[in-house]
Amino acid sequence: MLLRPADIASLLYLRLHPADSYGAMAERLGISKSTAHDSVQRLVRNRLAHESSRGMARVADGPALDFLSYGVPYVFAPDTVPDARGIPTGLRALDANESGRHAAALALVWPSRLGTARGIGVSPLVPAAPDLPHRDPPLYRSLALVDALRLGDARERELARELLRAEFATSAGA
């Protein structure tokens, strides 16, 4: 079954919040409960997650990291606009403590009236993405890293893969 953009956000959400309900996932991602449920079922069918006895699925770390790293940039190539105002994404969304590692990174933004950054406008994977910096900073960071994989150069993609691997190793679902 074909994956949809919201499925990638759902996978990252499951990884960070394995005990949450479909309702909580739907509210955070800006999708309906039925869309959240269908998204998780597609992840399971595509072997990016496993059924769990608790009702929600559990992310299959290895396949998920492989797909995020090498599949998502091709399957979910984003629509872009050359100049937009919005919320930073990609490597520029990382905190100031890491700024030295990605200072030359391409300036990417999710177009939004909420943001003040300027850069290449990138279509987010889910509607609620521009609200995430304040509502769910770890999910925001993960989605921003996925955008670095979707649009970054070779150096940026490698750094994003390294940071995602580290996040998967230390997150609540590990």
Image: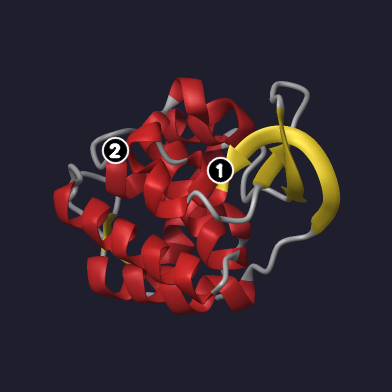
The residue at the point 25 percent across, 42 percent down is 18
Vertical side of 66 occupied by 29: above or below: above
Left-right relation of 12 to 127? left
Vertical side of 68 occupied by 144: above or below: above
Quarter of the figure with residue 164? bottom left
Q: Earlier in the sequence, mark 2 or mark 1?
A: 2
Q: Residues within 10 Å of mark 2 (few under 14, many from 20)?
A: some
The x and y percentages for residue 48 are 35, 69
Q: Which residue is more in the foreground, 19 or 161?
A: 161
Does residue 107 appear in this view? yes
Left-right relation of 168 to 87? left
Vertical side of 45 occupied by 160: above or below: above
As measured in the structure, the alpha-carbon distance from the residue carrying label 2 to the one carrying label 1 is 18 Å
The x and y percentages for residue 133 are 50, 27
The residue at the point 42 percent across, 28 percent down is 136
The amino acid marked with disc number 2 is: His
The x and y percentages for residue 31 are 60, 37
> Element type at marker 1?
helix
Label number found at residue 17: 2
The residue at the point 69 percent across, 41 percent down is 110
Does residue 2 appear in this view? no
Q: Which residue is more in the foreground, 137 or 38?
A: 137
What residue would you read off at disc 1?
Answer: 34
Q: Residues within 10 Å of mark 1 (few under 14, many from 20)?
A: few
Do the residues under discs 2 and 1 have CB atoms within 8 angstroms?
no
State the scheme by which the image is colored.
secondary structure
> Element type at marker 2?
loop
Q: Which residue is more in the foreground, 46 or 5?
A: 5
